[in-house]
Amino acid sequence: MSEISRAAWRRSFASFAFWLGAVLALVALVAGLALASCAPGDGTSSASDAYGGALNHTHDLLALRGVAHTVLLATHIGLYRTTNSGQTWLEVAGGAGQPIDGLMLYKLAQSPVDAQRVYVLAIPRTAAPAPAKPGLYTSNDAGIHWRLATPLTIFPNSAVFTVSAGASAPGEVFAIDSTQGIHGLYVSQDSGAHWQVAPPLPTSDPSGLLDDPTHPGRLLLWSRSTGLYESQNNGQSWAPAPGVQGAVYAVSRAGAIIYAPGDQGLFVSMDDGASFHLVDQLDTFTAVLASDQAPQDAYALGGTTIYTTTDAGHTWRPTSATSQHPGALTVDPANAAVAYVGFSYPLGVARTTNAGKQWRDVLP
């Protein structure tokens, strides 16, 4: 089989696996919701009560920049925090009597300007009313205390499923409502207290947004169906990112290197987004993340395996196997050898301190 045929086959298979995984995750979520709606105590009566019970699972995982050894874990039933690299975890929100009680913790974001400012998107978990209001919650102390910043009811259809913190001001935050098409980007300059609709987007199917802390106002917008776009003026106008083709699944930045995996392979910019090049067309990853400490040393999530690179994505090798199927990935911004992977069913987190040579379970 030729390299071109091999690449096309692997891209097709990986794309199929990506969407199959998404469908299976949705099916699992619906099943979990159905069970949760009829199980006593919202399904938290198992031996793993300390971490939400048998129905709990990971939605997002974030190692905080500028807050040493601190990681946030957003799950179906609670928000957990560690300040000692996973040795111990504390539920800080989502539990009975806590902020965000009864909601699903879905998406985490940290301000690139103020390291203490973090956000979590909380959406309904079951058909039963929750004590807390669905919305965007924020913390100004790196995740210790939380308050409601924005109820979802201010958005059309309450259909916000992703948020991103901006770099133009400490309180800048973006929300995407994909049901609104090219009018689906909202921006707040005061940590979610007030919102404005941004100018029209270049795609009717926005998936995520990334800001540039070294160039406030420079934005990258990606779509899982149409590609990658850039703005030099905080979203007033947009242009296709140079060199990127096809759908883009995620975008991440480490130093001046930007990683953009998609259905054509992995695109990388070594010059802070001025140009992108297809460096790997044989693999399709759903996420690629690196540490600011060593931007060329990245981790990638591909199916049931975590991969690593030391040359900014040109070559990859699998890490050692994890104890469960990896579903979320984050890298310590200050140490490229340290990364965390989140699991679902049962809920769990594993950590490596040697760039994937070994993984050790740190939750539960």
Image (cartoon, grey):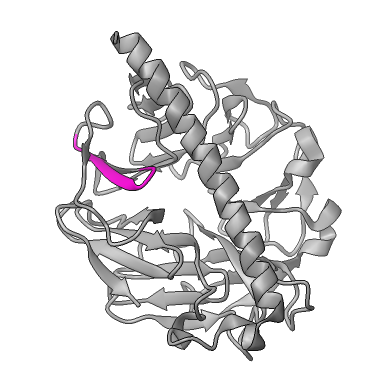
Q: Quadrant of the N terminus?
A: top left
In the rendered image of this protein, does residue 28 appear above or below residue 184? Answer: below
150 to the left or right of 316: right
| Quarter residue 339 falls in | bottom left
Query: What is the x, y in percent for residue 352?
Result: 22, 60
Looking at this view, is 237 or 48 the one in front? Answer: 48
Query: What is the x, y in percent for residue 103?
Result: 66, 74
Considering the whole magenta stretch, tell me its main secondary structure.
Answer: strand
State the residue at coordinates (61%, 87%): 98
Q: Is residue 306 magenta?
A: yes
- Total marks shown come to 0
Q: Quadrant of the C terminus?
A: bottom left
Residue 107 seen by the camera: yes
In the rendered image of this protein, does residue 79 appear above or below residue 39? Answer: above
Query: What is the x, y in percent for residue 55?
Result: 54, 73
State the residue at coordinates (33%, 16%): 6
| Quarter residue 300 falls in | top left
4 to the left or right of 57: left
State the residue at coordinates (22%, 51%): 336
141 to the left or right of 271: right
Looking at this view, is 17 or 149 the one in front? Answer: 17
Q: Which residues are magenta?
A: 302-310
Query: What is the x, y in percent for residue 304?
Result: 35, 47
| Quarter residue 308 falls in | top left
